[in-house]
Image (spheres, rainbow, N blue to C red):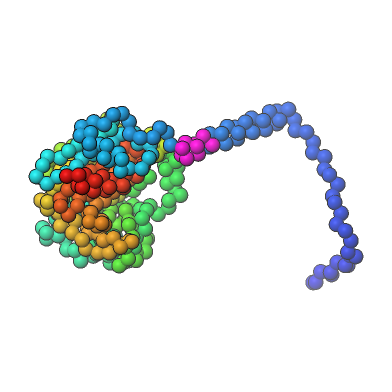
Amino acid sequence: MSTPAASPQPPGPPQRPAPLERPAPPPRLRALLRSRRGMLAAALALALVAACALAFPWPRGFRGAPAGDESLARSVQAALPAGYRHSGAFALVEDGSSPRFGGFGADEHTVFEIGSVTKTFTAALFADAVRRGEVRAAQRLGSIFPELRDAPAGELTLEQLAEQQTGFPRRADAAPLGQLPRTLARLDPCTKDLAGVLAHAAQTQPDPGHYAYSNLGVALLGQAVARAAHTDYPALVRARLLEPLGMTETTVPMRPADLPAGSPHGYTAAGLPAGPWTLGALAPAGSIRSTAHDMALWVAAMADGTAPGAAAAKERADADDGAKIGYVWMHTDGLTWHNGATGGYRSWAGFDAHGRGLVVLTDSAVSVDEAADALREEGADS
């Protein structure tokens, strides 16, 4: 049955509705509203303070007077941009000479998170595993992890992972917003175990042949090499890299429980304490903790080709903006290098064609990428 249409009404000016009288809330409700307004005002004030802290970092410059080799410390300090840094340790490697160490508030034995410089260790393990015949550069990821055999990621080769040619996303978690509470609390945002990482990889669509910096890709590479060697990633790093090179001050945590009591923590760019990053199964992409002393050993051995898997540093493929890439190691302007970043640390390690290397470690989340300028400056002065 149809509904009859309403009779049209003649047009006229819209009528303003009469104002409604709002009854006054009872006293208890008024008190509650006032308290909620007060809480809201306090929350807004705290948000404003936090925003100001982020926009205007705390006191700028390294803490304290330069230690060790003052010339090196001053050179690195001059090369870096103004920004809050709590402390830092630096090492300059020169062919045929003992490393020079300098720093502010730290020395060559102070422990730092090296972040993504960890990837250079993963790359060396891969190159060494190829030399040993444990894996092949063209081997498919799915041949090592059955969980990926039917997924697009399973078709990726280990070499594509090492050269960052997978098109995988930079982040390594499927739901970044799900990590927001941990990020705001300045805690390690990556807590997945290997099963979780493989499940995420199985759901991720790669774009092979296109350079894209990816933590997920390098994490899968490190886990694949460890699986092929029938061990875990930390044990493989220790046995094949740290012990042969005498890097006794370097550790490879995967869980907070792996950190000894009293382990140092870093600071955000605003000077707030940051939680340690151990990264779970993503450890091959960035969990190593080391010192300037040990990192000088690492850079020297990579520069002169004596490190196990040193072939990883060889230039192999195209990266962004005209740069080249080896297995993880970047090649720009005559330098072979990699940098790192965690919630409270920044790092840079690299060397030039003459075998001169530089390590910069800081316990604050302020970039140290300009460290290459210090290496060039020291080279020009020698």
Residue 176 picture location, percent across and down? 43, 51
In the rendered image, the quadrant that contains the C terminus is: top left
Estimate the x, y position of residue 344 in percent, counting from the top left: 35, 39
Q: Say above or below: 51 vs 123.
A: above
Nearer-the-camera pick, 286 or 374 = 374
Tell which of 334 and 196 is nearer to you. 334
Which percent across, then down, holds residue 237? Answer: 18, 47
Q: Is residue 117 magenta?
A: no
* Residue 305 left/right relative to 189: left
Q: Is residue 226 above or below residue 359?
A: below
User: Which secondary structure type mostly characterizes the magenta part of the structure?
Assistant: helix
Instruction: Specify the quadrant of the image occupied by residue 61.
Output: top left
Location of residue 323 (image quadrant): bottom left
Which sits in the foreground, 281 or 106? 106
Q: Is there any visible trace of residue 263 in the rendered image?
A: no
**Residue at the spot x=47%, y=40% of the render?**
55
Q: Is residue 244 shown left or right of residue 92? A: left
Q: Image point 9% across, 45% down: which residue?
A: 96
Q: Residue visible at 12% across and 44% down?
A: 245
Outermost residue, front side: 381
Question: How many numbered circles does the render carry?
Answer: 0
Relative depth, front residue between 103 and 210: 103
**Could you tell me if residue 376 is visible in this image?**
yes
- Which residues make up the magenta segment? 48-56
Position in image of residue 375 (x %, y %): 23, 46
Q: Residue at x 60, y 33 (%)?
A: 41
Point out the residue furthest to the bottom here: 1
Q: Quadrant of the N terminus?
A: bottom right
Q: Which corner quadrant of the image does residue 221 belong to? A: bottom left
